[in-house]
Image: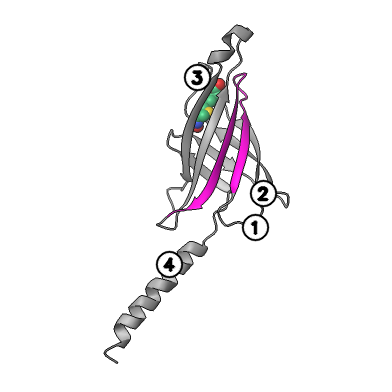
Amino acid sequence: MVHATPFLLVLSLAMLASALSARKCTLTGRWTNDLGSNMTIMAVNEKGEFLGSYHTAVTASGNEIKVSPLQGSQHRTNKDSQATFGFTVNWSFSDSVTVFTGQCFVDEDGKEVLRTMWLLRSNVDSIKDDWKATMVGTNVFTRLRTKKE
Ligand code: BTN
């Protein structure tokens, strides 16, 4: 009986570790990033394709920010618990386009997180300005929680 306690402790830790590692990261839902931008990803279909909307907190355009559509795809629906994905935001208030690519992870605390990298292409008047038309960066997205949650 004296030896049962450490055994049970090890067993519970092993079960907890296995439960955390087995958790799946799902793209569907509402997300917020490190800039304060919010996005909603609708259902992912059987081909891994999805639609959604993006509300950026910042803009390089100087225009009034409006919610913009996004479309993307994830690598393998339901086969990979931490899928790679990409999506494009076609900005409705500027003539720019941003492409994001990333991976949906379950972190050490069991929380879902999207690690992404993006390219923002701005419209320039001349090919001579092409060199300054693309920005690059990273964004980290976590689930957007309502106050009730
Ligand atoms: C524009 O300025 O022309 C459109 C908005 C661009 C917002 C960028 S996209 C990459 C980065 N991540 C965000 O959430 N917002 C900025």
Q: Residues within 10 Å of mark 2 (few under 14, many from 20)?
A: some
Main secondary structure type of the part rendered in magenta: strand
Q: Of discs 3 and 1, which sits in the foreground? A: 1
Which type of secondary structure does the marked residue at label 2 adopt?
loop
* Residue 68 image label: none
Say whether disc 3 or disc 1 marks the residue closer to the N-terminus: 3
* CB under 8 Å between discs 2 and 4: no
- Residues under labels 2 and 1: Cα distance? 10 Å
In front of the other: 41 or 10: 10
Using the rendered view, name the quadrant where residue 124 is placed. Answer: top right
In front of the other: 25 or 32: 25
Residue 130 in percent (x, y) is at 59, 13
Q: Is residue 35 above or below residue 5?
A: above
Which residue shows up at 54% across the image and 32% down it? Answer: 118
* CB under 8 Å between discs 3 and 1: no
Q: Is residue 106 magenta?
A: yes
Identify residue for label 3: 60
Identify residue for label 4: 17
Identify residue for label 2: 44
Q: Is residue 116 magenta?
A: no
| Disc 1 CB within 8 Å of nearest ligand 1 atom | no
Residue 125 visible from this viewpoint: no
Residue 128 in percent (x, y) is at 60, 7
Start and end of the magenta stretch? Answer: 84-107
- Residues under labels 2 and 4: Cα distance? 28 Å
* Residue 78 image label: 1
Say whether disc 4 or disc 3 marks the residue closer to the N-terminus: 4
